[in-house]
């Protein structure tokens, strides 16, 4: 409709009112009433036209979105839907099409915060990633390496799964927990697997003795978050949100030592290699070192600003790395400590934008600087130079959700557990020459996603 013929223009309304007045001869009051009635009638007609136009716009936008989802699926789920429902996008139009464009641009800007410079297009990356049989149905909470080619994981499906990631096949699945599995550990050189759960129990499994647990360790009153096996394979340490740290005899499943510390909500425990000491992180923001012989705390590190979520000890027993809770880049760091000088902070690894859920030492390849790997709720994995705290490699897994655990199998291969998309096989290597494509960010090392399972 042209502007000249718009019935709602003041000139048109005025001329109409004059015609009505000349016909009725009702005086000035009649002119006013007739003009108001005509204006009201034409306003309703204009609103009716606008309603039909807006409805048509909504239909067009929904059709475009539907075709886009069917023809070119995206790994970044902006609509917070499950993959099975991705063909039905939820769209709410609260204004014009331009307003909707502004909303989508906000989503793009936020997701760009977690992308690394020079990262390849998602579709190009997906074409190079091998998709194997899924290890779990649901989110994964924990993963450890069992051998150079196999890992053990646990998740919300209550299963403990042994998976050969080199062949892409499930080797064994243990069912016994009644709630989600929170932690798994293995004893090196054996077929023993230990698992903890929100059902407050700790189970021991043997790959050579069927599908039933061979030992059960019961005594905690809340979820068990920490498990560690002694270097000689005779003792098991467990820690829980009930503030109790327990020491068990593995052969008899008897609890030999218990110690309760107020507000010590345990998040992780690990045994210091070749010693009787145990490192433990807590929601009270502290790190404690325990003597397993006296079952007493020998050192408490200075409290951090945020909850300590995880810890790992270097193979030589000299260093400990812990990771921190946080949000918006506040906190979110990993910290390197010198165990030879308890409480001595060496460096901090800063760069994640959300909680750093896991931090581990990478096995040495015999040359170069030692490395530390971290994973975060911002969906990224970072590799750091242990001594200088320089970030030498980053990989962002869009759509994977929080990356909660890392399990290095050798100096070049790393298994990463996620909330949304299962387990990921990552490979570490030298960065590509300038001008060639790479799945990792700028840096001395190239971190690539090879497979998902």
Image: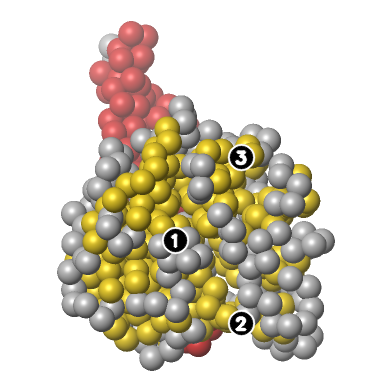
**Residue 421 visible:** no
User: Depth-wise, is mark 2 or mark 3 nearer the camera?
Assistant: 3
Q: Is residue 435 above or below residue 12?
A: below
Residue denoted by label 2:
412
Query: What's the CA distance linking mark 2 and mark 1?
Result: 25 Å
As measured in the structure, the alpha-carbon distance from the residue carrying label 2 to the one carrying label 3 is 36 Å
> Residue 130, which numbered label?
none
Q: Position of residue 96 (x, y in %)?
A: 45, 48
**Residue at 17%, 69% in the rendered image:** 212
Q: Earlier in the sequence, mark 2 or mark 3?
A: 3
Circles 2 and 1, Cβ within 8 Å, touching? The answer is: no
Which residue: 28% across, 38% down? 221
Residue 229: image tag: 1
Q: Left or right of 130: which side holds 294?
A: right
Direction bottom: furthest residue:
167
Which quadrant does the C terminus fall into?
bottom left
Which residue is under mark 3?
Answer: 298
Give the structural element (helix, strand or loop) at label 3: strand
Q: Say which of 251 and 144 sits in front.
A: 251
- Mark positioned earlier in the residue sequence (2 or 1): 1
**Left or right: 198 with respect to 417?**
left
């Amino acid at each position: 409709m042209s502007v000249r013929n718009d019935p709602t223009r003041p000139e048109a309304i005025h001329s109409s009112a004059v015609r009505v007045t000349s016909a009725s001869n009702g005086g000035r009051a009649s002119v006013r009433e007739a003009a108001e009635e005509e204006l009201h009638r034409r306003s309703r007609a204009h609103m009716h036209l606008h309603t039909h136009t807006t409805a048509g716009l909504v239909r067009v936008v929904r059709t475009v979105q539907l075709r886009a989802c069917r023809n070119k699926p995206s790994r970044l789920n902006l609509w917070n839907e499950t993959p099975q429902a991705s063909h039905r996008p939820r769209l709410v139009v609260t204004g014009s099409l331009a307003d909707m464009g502004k909303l989508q641009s906000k989503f793009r800007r936020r997701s760009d915060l977690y992308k690394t410079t020079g990262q390849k297009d998602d579709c190009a990356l997906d074409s190079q990633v091998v998709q194997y049989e899924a290890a779990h149905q649901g989110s994964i909470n924990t993963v450890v390496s069992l051998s150079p080619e196999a890992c053990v994981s646990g998740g919300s499906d209550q299963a403990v799964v042994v998976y050969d990631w080199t062949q892409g096949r499930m080797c064994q699945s243990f069912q016994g927990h009644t709630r989600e599995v929170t932690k798994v550990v293995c004893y090196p050189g054996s077929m023993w697997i230990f698992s903890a759960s929100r059902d407050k129990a700790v189970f021991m499994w043997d790959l050579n003795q069927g599908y039933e647990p061979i030992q059960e360790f019961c005594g905690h009153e809340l979820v068990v978050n920490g498990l560690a096996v002694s270097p000689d394979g005779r003792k098991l340490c467990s820690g829980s949100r009930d503030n109790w740290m327990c020491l068990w005899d593995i052969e008899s499943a008897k609890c030999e030592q218990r110690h309760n510390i107020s507000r010590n909500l345990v998040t992780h425990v690990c045994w210091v290699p070749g010693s009787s000491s145990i490192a433990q992180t807590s929601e009270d923001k502290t790190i404690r070192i325990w003597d397993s012989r006296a079952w007493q705390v020998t050192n408490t590190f200075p409290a951090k600003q945020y909850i300590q979520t995880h810890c790992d000890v270097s193979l030589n027993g000299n260093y400990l790395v812990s990771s921190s809770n946080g949000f918006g880049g506040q906190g979110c760091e990993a910290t390197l400590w010198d165990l030879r000088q308890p409480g001595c902070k060496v460096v901090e690894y800063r760069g994640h934008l959300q909680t750093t859920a896991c931090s581990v030492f990478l096995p040495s390849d015999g040359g170069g600087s030692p490395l530390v790997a971290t994973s975060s709720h911002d969906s990224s994995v970072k590799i750091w130079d242990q001594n200088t705290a320089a970030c030498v490699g980053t990989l962002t897994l869009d759509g994977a959700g929080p990356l909660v655990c890392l399990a290095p199998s050798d100096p070049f291969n790393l298994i990463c557990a996620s909330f949304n998309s299962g387990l990921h096989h990552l490979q570490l290597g030298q960065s590509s020459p300038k001008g060639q494509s790479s799945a990792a960010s700028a840096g001395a090392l190239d971190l690539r996603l090879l497979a998902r399972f």
